[in-house]
Image (cartoon, coloured by chain):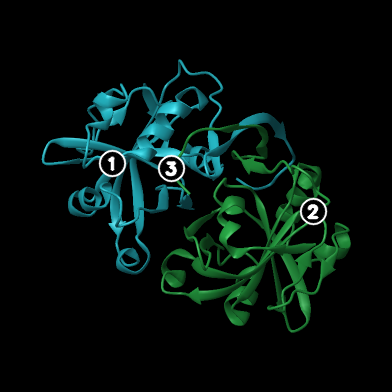
Chain colours: A green, B cyan
Amino acid sequence: MRDLPLSKVYQLIEPGPVVLLTTALKGRANVMTMSWHMMMDFEPPLLACIVSEANYSFAALRETGECVIAIPAVELALKVVKVGNSSGGDIDKFKTFDLTPAPADRVAAPLVVECYANLECRIIDTGFTDKYDLFVLEVLKAWIDPKQKNPRTIHHRGNGRFVVDGVTIKLKSKMR
Amino acid sequence: MRDLPLSKVYQLIEPGPVVLLTTALKGRANVMTMSWHMMMDFEPPLLACIVSEANYSFAALRETGECVIAIPAVELALKVVKVGNSSGGDIDKFKTFDLTPAPADRVAAPLVVECYANLECRIIDTGFTDKYDLFVLEVLKAWIDPKQKNPRTIHHRGNGRFVVDGVTIKLKSKMR
């Protein structure tokens, strides 16, 4: 994996892919599936996400203030669903689903080697956490896997239906 | 257009489509393009979005506390980009781009007839607005156009590149 400039992070999150979120609490790593997230600012990249207090990851996220957001391509879809169907309170999801954790640079939470992009994040604002389970994250470092060419992401439509990226079109937008 | 149960709204927003946001201030309607949004809760459906203070719509949104989020399919992509490239301070975007406003039920902001779904929203929390331009919206009423079968949405990848929905896959998820 190689560095991705922080100015390009929005291009990964803005399209709304299903992502994995990893945490590490007292040396124990965990991973969950998430798709309630959005960009909040370009650079430094800020994003918001909702992690329900019902999720096992909530305590680790809140206590450590750190996580990694890893973006899987469609080839990982089955594993992504299995991660979402289980709890880190019961099993070691990295081992059970054969996902490879790798050390991050700036946070204790691990990267997910099989994902085509990984974003190392720290929580910068918990003002909406008690009320909405919303975390504001700053991306400290971003990684991209140059070996995964044109990764197709998945987008959750509810009840296990996922739409997979189709064709890409280019239009004359003045938007960044 | 017919009613969509509020419990299904997350299935429209969670996949991360580019949307239109309409407002009406003192009888004057406006529309902007947006893709920084996410679900926050299922029912009543809550969502968050970022509308920059630099957008002409910001003042109307803040002052009226209301908007409509309209979801276009790929057939409208060119108009969606033109809406994003221009400002309501200069032109009447509905007229200029031949989009049809229709009265909403619960808010003064108009529906966009050409969009396959329309969500009537009111702002319920501005606690993060000054700091992040973030609005928390409650969806009061949702509309779906049954004539638009299998609409394919678009997702912004930056600089005018949009990925169009491809195939839909079904996996055994326990997630709602």
Residue A160 point in image, percent of width and height: 67, 40
Q: Secondary structure at mark 3?
A: loop
Q: Are marks 3 and 1 in contact (CB under 8 Å)?
A: no
Three-letter residue code for mark 2: Pro
Three-letter residue code for mark 3: Lys
For the C terminus of chain B, the quadrant is top right
Residue at 51 percent across and 33 percent down: it is A171
Distance from disc 1 to disc 2, alpha carbons, whole Å, reads 38 Å
Residue at 46 percent across and 51 percent down: it is B36
Q: Which mark is residue B87?
A: 1
Three-letter residue code for mark 1: Ser
Crowd around label 2: few <14 · some 14–19 · many ≥20 (10 Å): few
Residue at 21 percent across and 42 percent down: it is B89
Which residue position is annotated with label 2?
A146
Foreground residue, A116 or A162?
A116
Q: Secondary structure at mark 1?
A: loop
Which residue position is annotated with label 3?
A174
Distance from disc 3 to disc 2, alpha carbons, whole Å, reads 28 Å
Q: Residue B128, located in which quarter of the rendered image? A: bottom left
Relative to A124, residue B2 above or below: above
Do tags 3 and 1 sit on the same chain? no
Relative to A115, residue A68 above or below: below
